[in-house]
Image (tube, rainbow, N blue to C red):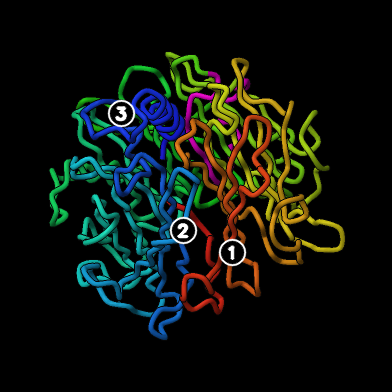
Amino acid sequence: MSGRRRQAWGAAVAVVLAVTGAAPAAADSAATAARLQDDFNGDGYADLAVAAPSGSVGGKAQAGYVAVLYGTAHGLTTTGRKVFSQSTAGVPGSVEKGDRFGSALTTADLNRDGYADLVVGVGGEDTASGGTDSGYVQVVWGGKNGLSGAASLATGKSANDRLGTQGRLTAADVDADGATDVVTVQNEKNLRVLKGPFAKDGSHEGEQVVTDRYNSRILDLAAGDVNGDGITDVVAAANDQEEWDSRRIAYWYGTRDGVSPYFTLVYDIDGAGLQGGENLDVGDVNQDGYDDIVVGRAVDGYDSDHDAYPAKGGRVGWIPGTANGPDGVAGVFLNQDSAGVPGTAEKGDRFGTDVQIGDVDGDGYPDVVTGLPGEDLGSAGNAGSVVVLRGGAAGLTGAGAQAVSQSTGNVPGTAESGDTFGAAVHLGDANADGRADLAVGAPGENSASGFVWTFRSGAATVVAPNGTTAFGTTLLGTNGKNAKFASGFAY
C-alpha cells in the first residue's frame, strides 16, 4: 500500500470533519480515494485488518484467519469486531490445512462503490488449475455495515506459485484509468497485474504479466508515484535467487498502457545496484511532490553488509523520489547507532523488520515506523521494540525518534523472551484526527498465540495515557495455539 495515500487519507478526513462535523460522503476525487484506503464501512475512520495465516480453523492447522476492528471517534474498538476465514459464509473455498488465508493483505476500493475492500492472499491454497501451493487471491467487499460477501480474483498458474503470499500483494491505479488494479507476484518474480475495475463476482478487465528477464525473487511490493508524473509506479524489494545476499530495490513505472515491461534498479554512487532490504513502503516523506522509497534491511551478518552502511543490527534507508525516479545516491540510512535513534545497534536486533509511512505527529510530514523484534530488553531476549523516525523537509532523520515496547509506561503487558513485539507494524488514522495511529504485532506473545497493541498518536508521542488497546486470540474467540496472530496487517 502506498504510504502517501495513507497520509493523505488522514489529512483529507481531518479537514472534512473539521468543516462539516461529519464523515465525508464518497466522491470521485483523489482525497476520497485516499480516504477509502482503509475505511471498510465508509464512516470516515480507518479500520484495521490483522492476519493470522498460521492460525487453526476447524481443526485445520495453518488454515488461517483475519480479524477486523473498526475505527471510531475514540479510535479502534473491539466492539463489532469480525473474524474472516474460508469457513465464513460467502468466502470462496473451504478450510484446509496449510492454506494460510491472510498470508498477505491489502485494501482498496476495487468496485468503485465508495467503500474500501479487503484483498486477501491465500498463499498455500491448492488449486485445480495450478496445483499444490499455487495460491489464491480473494476479496471481501466493504459496505455500509462493514465487510461482508467475497469473491475470487485470481489463482496461481503453477505448483508452488504461492500467489498472494507475504509481501507480494498491493493495490494501485498503475495505468491512470481511474480504476484500482491489484498487483501480485507469479512464480516469485513476475508481476501479475489484475486490471480494475472489478465486478461483485470478482471479474475484471483482464491481466498483464510482466516477465522478469533475470533470476530475481520479489520479497515485498509497494506502490507510489516515484517520478511525480501522476501515474502510480510499483516498487519491489528483491534479490537474486542464486545469491540471496544481493538485496536490491527495483521499480516499474506506471504508464497509460500499464506497468512498464522492464524494471529499473535503484543505483548507488558507484553505479551498482544499491543494497536494499527485505521490505519497503512508498510515500512523500519530505513533501516535495515525489514519492520516496523507505526500505528496511533487517537481516545483517552477510558479506554485502560492507556495501550497506550502517548495516549492523539492521537499518532503514530513505531514497528520495525525483523527476528522474528514485535517487539512490542521495539516500539516507539509519540504524540504532545513528544520532537520535534510541538503543544500540547489535547483531540480530532486526531493526527495519517492517517499515510503514504515515504522519504520526500531524506536522504535515509523514514519519516512518519500524519494528525490532530481535531487540533484547534486559534479560528478555527477542522481546522486541518499535521505533518512530521523524520525517521533514530534509527527509528522514533520527532526531526526535521514539522507541515503544512493553517496557514503556502505559503499555499493557510485560516484555518477555520471544515475544517479538514489532514483527509487524501498521499506521492508520483510526479516530480521524489527522495523525496516523500505530498498531504493533507480537506474534510470539503468549507462546506464539500472538497479540496486538494499538496506540493513539499525539503531537509529541505515540503513547498517550489511556490511549492504548491490547488484544489477542482470547478476545476474538479463535484458536490461539501457534496462531502467531498479528504476523501481518493490511497495508
Judged by depth in the image, the label closer to the viewer, 3 or 1, is: 1
- Residue type at mark 3 is Gly
Based on the picture, tell me whether residue 96 belongs to the magenta stretch: no
Residue at image location 41% in from the left, 59% down from the top: 68
The numbered disc on residue 50 is 2
User: How much space separates mark 1 and mark 2, taking CA atoms?
Assistant: 10 Å
* First in sequence: mark 3 vs mark 2: 2
Residue 352 location (% of width, % of height): 64, 44
Residue 451 location (% of width, % of height): 59, 64
Secondary structure of residue under mark 3: strand
Please determine whether, in this image, residue 62 is positioned above or below residue 183: below
Residue at image location 37% in from the left, 66% down from the top: 160
User: What residue does disc 3 label?
Assistant: 254
User: How much space separates mark 3 and mark 1, taking CA atoms?
Assistant: 37 Å
Residue 173 location (% of width, % of height): 27, 33
Instruction: In this rendered view, identify the residue nearer to me: 438 or 326.
Output: 438
Horizontal relation, residue 376 to residue 199: left or right = right
- Residue type at mark 1 is Phe
Mark 3 and mark 2 residues within 8 Å of each other at the beta carbon: no
- Residue type at mark 2 is Val
Q: Residue furthest front?
A: 21
For residue 64, say whether it is visible. yes
Please determine whether, in this image, residue 378 is positioned above or below residue 432: below
The N terminus, quarter of image: top left
User: What residue does disc 1 label?
Assistant: 451
Residue at image location 29% in from the left, 41% down from the top: 210
